Image: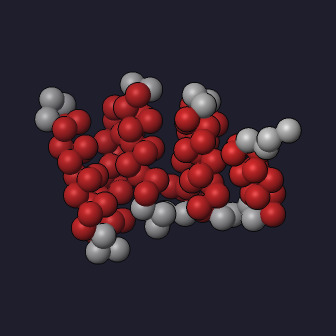
Amino acid sequence: MQISRLEKLLEFIKNEPEDPFLKYALATEYLRINQTDKALEYYEDLVNNHRDYAGTYYHLGKLYEALGRKQDAINTYETGMKVTRDQHDNHAFSELQGVYNELTDDY
């Protein structure tokens, strides 16, 4: 029997429960299989406990948008822009600024 990606990731995180990459991978996998509640749980854990994991902010913001949580998305993008600016990650900052501007144009 073939082991699914999700099963592999869940096994990995048992050994490294605070690994931000594994949390991010799990969030992404849960989102892929439409388990948004679990995806949200992992993404929110990342922004609360691994603030510098910059890739989270874009995806969490997009998930908030999909869930109709516009203000949460805006707040997430704003925080992500601060984090990426501090990290001098111009590419990530630019992506976050783009989705933030799209979202706030009609706000």
In this rendering, position of residue 34 left or right of residue 97: right
The answer to which quarter of the image holds residue 29 is: top right
Name the foreground residue: 21 vs 49.
Answer: 21
The residue that appears at 50% across and 55% down in the rendered structure is 47
Q: Residue at x 26, y 63 (%)?
A: 91
x, y percent for residue 50: 55, 63
Residue displayed at 15% across by 29% down: 106
Q: Residue at x 35, y 56 (%)?
A: 79
Depicted 72 relative to depicted 34: above or below: below
Near-viewer residue (94 or 76): 94
Side of 102 where 18 appears, left or right: right
In the image as oriented, which residue stretches furthest toward the left? 105
**Place of residue 46 in the rendered image (x, y in percent of width and height, measured from the top left):** 55, 55
Residue 33 place in picture, x, y as percent: 60, 31
**Quarter occupied by residue 100:** top left
Classify the position of the C terminus by image quarter: top left
25 relative position to 6: left or right: left
Looking at this view, is 22 or 70 the one in front? Answer: 22
Q: Which residue lies furthest to the right in this view?
A: 1
Q: Is residue 45 visible?
A: no
Q: How many labels does the image show?
A: 0
User: What scheme was used to colour the molecule?
Assistant: secondary structure
Residue 21, relative to residue 31: is it above or below? Answer: below
The residue at the far front in this view is 1
Give coordinates of residue 62: x percent, y percent.
38, 38
Q: In which quarter of the image is the N terminus?
A: top right
Task: Tell whether 87 sits left or right of 16.
Answer: left
Note whether residue 107 is visible.
Answer: yes
